[in-house]
């Protein structure tokens, strides 16, 4: 089992890199699984989701799971699993008033149990200015702590810059 974390800013090539990485891990007889945490709550997000679907094509079986990520990982059978993305999942958890640390613990436990390549995509939100409102600051802080925990658990960590992967770990 290998856990891979792919992080970076918006539109930095994270998803494209994660999909390519999963395709390299594909084994004959297996399948590629894409666990989507986004919810199509408005037209702009529906458009983004459609774009992501077209990028991955028919190669991936898509599982839409905005909250129960640990269960989705445990039930996904394949050669490689891409989870896209952790920060959207975090936002869903916070919006649902879920216990973030416990949910992260559960996903990391599921990651340790898997026997396939598991690739997490996440956004780096801490490189900008300090947000002006308390909720945005809380999200930034949770995201930073979450990303550190996933990076610690990962076998490989990549930072995407201008579409180029920099291996950090």
Image (tube, rainbow, N blue to C red):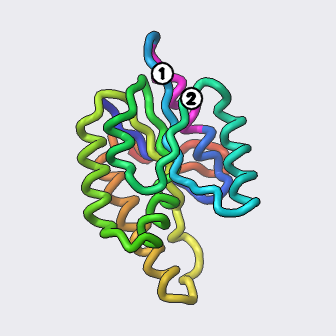
Tell me which label, 1 or 2, sits earlier in the chain: 1
Tell me the element at label 1.
Answer: loop
Left or right: residue 138 versus residue 133 is left
CA–CA distance between discs 1 and 2?
7 Å
Identify residue for label 2: 60
Mark on residue 66?
none
Indicate whether residue 34 is drawn in magenta. Answer: no
Question: Magenta region: which residues?
Answer: 17-27
**Magenta stretch: dominant SS?**
helix
Left or right: residue 121 versus residue 153 is right
Report the residue at 38% width, 74% height from top. Answer: 97
Report the residue at 28% width, 43% height from top. Answer: 110
Quadrant where the C terminus is found in the figure = top left
Taking depth in this image into account, of 169 and 59 the one nearest to the observer is 59
Quadrant where the N terminus is found in the figure = top left
Report the residue at 54% width, 24% height from top. Answer: 23
């Amino acid at each position: 089992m290998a856990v891979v974390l792919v992080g970076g800013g918006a539109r930095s090539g994270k998803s494209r890199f994660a999909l390519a990485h999963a395709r390299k891990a594909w084994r004959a007889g297996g399948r590629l699984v894409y666990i989507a945490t986004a919810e199509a709550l408005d037209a702009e997000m529906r458009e983004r989701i459609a774009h992501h679907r077209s990028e991955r094509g028919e190669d991936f079986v898509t599982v839409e799971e905005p909250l129960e990520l640990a269960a989705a990982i445990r039930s996904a059978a394949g050669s490689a699993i891409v989870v896209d993305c952790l920060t959207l999942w975090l936002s869903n958890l916070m919006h649902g008033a879920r216990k973030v640390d416990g949910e992260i613990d559960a996903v990391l436990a599921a990651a340790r149990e898997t026997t396939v390549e598991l690739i997490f995509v996440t956004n780096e939100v801490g490189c900008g200015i300090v947000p002006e409102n308390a909720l945005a600051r809380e999200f930034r802080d949770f995201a930073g702590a979450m990303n550190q925990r996933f990076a610690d658990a990962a076998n490989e960590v990549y930072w995407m810059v201008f579409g180029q992967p920099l291996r950090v770990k």
